[in-house]
Amino acid sequence: MEDKSLRSAGLKITVPRLKILEILERNSTRHLSAEDIYRILIESNEDIGLATIYRVLTQFEAAGLVSRHHFEGSTAVFELKPEGHHDHIVCLECGRIEEFADDIIEDRQKAVAKRLGFVLREHSLILYGDCAQCVSRKQSKKA
Amino acid sequence: MEDKSLRSAGLKITVPRLKILEILERNSTRHLSAEDIYRILIESNEDIGLATIYRVLTQFEAAGLVSRHHFEGSTAVFELKPEGHHDHIVCLECGRIEEFADDIIEDRQKAVAKRLGFVLREHSLILYGDCAQCVSRKQSKKA
DNA sequence: CTAGTTGCAAATCATTTGCACTTGC
DNA sequence: GCAAGTGCAAATGATTTGCAACTAG
């Protein structure tokens, strides 16, 4: 199944690559850092080095299989590249991440780029705030 | 003049802080990294350590005087926080950075956050592309 | 005076790389 | 078999921190 994506990316099918793909699929709702993946592999008794994880993730990114994000903080997180494009909103309190897509924003971005004489290649849009749960938690603390 | 901003930020007025503020003002059209500032200081025969620059920039950021951006690449860049909010478009070829503001995008961001139950605190929007100059340079190379 | 600042060197953190050793095909 | 891939340890680059010396108020 995932062999295909590897093959079409011109990558040999190896244990580390399959395992990492599998972990990304199993956690498709979360955004994992290289360390996260490393820990999961260790727990599964897989003997795969951190360096390999970084190498594989970078290859996956180049192959268009995953995307890399730099949210608040110093570490990068990865997710399987979804069908449609989407952006992210991150809760500054609990770290929860939601995805969204907004055509109007996308259109305006193109318009803005054009106005400034740029050919738009890609973009990064990240909203930061407090999610509903954290807001109500704060509220009750105040009361 | 710049004494005020330091005072109101609760920071003592010191040579390193004044010099760094001055450099940021003098380069208000550019986005400088800590190293950039360090180099400029060296050239001005100022004896200020890199560590101090990082400390001062972090304090300035906390005080709301400057904003820190993570564009492509591994180093952070800083700019004096401008009056009005704006976002950035970065040329992937030459690194040129332009600023822009778009009310429609801002409004949609708020709407999206609300729909997802978030209270929006801030956001980061960066467009990446090729600027007019680089596009035409590429064009002529092809011809 | 004395708490806040600084410079320097050493420490940290995430990520990358060199290299001898596997492994997929 | 051989190029591609991997593990480990050491290297890197950006940023941070410990600490003794310094300076603004």
Image (cartoon, coloured by chain):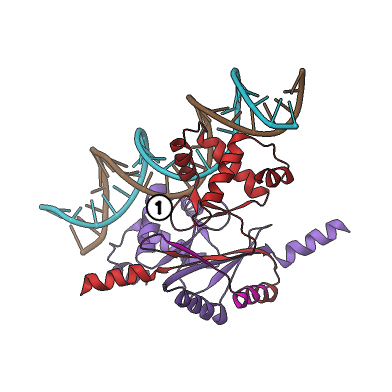
Chain colours: A red, B purple, C cyan, D brown
In the rendered image, the vertical position of residue D2 relative to residue A138, given as above or below: above
Q: Nearer the viewer, residue B11 or A35?
A: A35
In the rendered image, the vertical position of residue A110 relative to residue B17, given as above or below: below
Would you say residue B49 is visible in this rendering?
Answer: no
Give the magenta part as a residue range: A94-110
Is D16 displayed left or right of A61 in the figure? left
Q: Nearer the viewer, residue B121 or B56?
A: B121
**Which subunit holds the residue at mark 1?**
B
Residue carrying label 1: B54
In the rendered image, the vertical position of residue A83 relative to residue B99, given as above or below: above
Q: Nearer the viewer, residue B72 or A95?
A: A95
Name the residue: 39% across, 48% down: B51
Is B43 displayed left or right of B60 in the figure? right
The three-letter code of the residue at mark 1 reads: Tyr
Residue C18 image position (x, y, % from top left): 60, 27
Name the residue: 70% across, 74% down: A114
